[in-house]
Image (spheres, grey):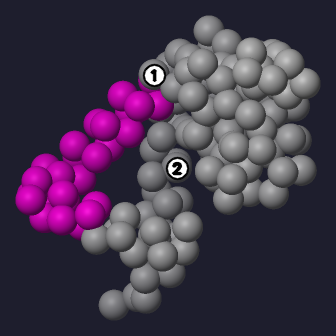
Amino acid sequence: MADIGVLSAHLLSGFQKELFTRLAEVGHGEMRPRHGAVMAYIAPAGTRASELSERSGQHKQVVGTLIDELERLGYVSRQPDPADRRAKLVVPTELGRDQMLQAAKIIAEIEDGFARRVGTEKFSAFKEVFAEIARTYG
């Protein structure tokens, strides 16, 4: 059997392929896996870029570049942070909120498929253990 790194890479690759193929089918063909460093961690009311960097584990410059790209694509906008006018929040636009909703639905369907394949209890236990192990690297 392959080691956990290889297995994780295969799972991530297959998961991303299905997610982004299906996102394209529902009108979000511009989205790429790299955009997940922003879109998977952004709050509906907005999130500071520094928080997105921290949450995603990506360097601030990488997140800044992704925000620029997502802003050009119409998925996010930068707005003043009401708590600190000097700071900016990255806020999902209507298009961004739709992408987030569609992604959540697709992810739930993918996970439901995994649960049907191996059994609900087994899949639930897998997610718990995988999350626990992943936290050691987070």
Tell me the residue that label 2 is attached to.
16
| Image-based side of 105 in relation to 81, left or right | left
- Residue 113: in magenta span: yes
> What are the residue bounds of the magenta stretch?
102-128
Instruction: Name above or below for residue 78 compared with residue 35.
Output: above
Residue 111, given in percent of the width and then of the height, sits at 28, 46
CA gap between label 1 and label 2 equals: 16 Å
Residue 105, x across and y down, in percent: 36, 28
User: Judging from the image, what secondary structure is the residue with disc 2 in?
Assistant: helix
| Amino acid tagged 2 | Gln
Q: How many badges with numbers are in the image?
A: 2
Mark 1 lies on residue: 101
Which is closer to the viewer, label 1 or label 2? Answer: 1
Residue, x 57% and y 28% (percent of image)?
43
Please tell me which residue is depicted at 13% across the width and 64% down the height of the picture: 122
Residue 39: tell me if it is visible: yes
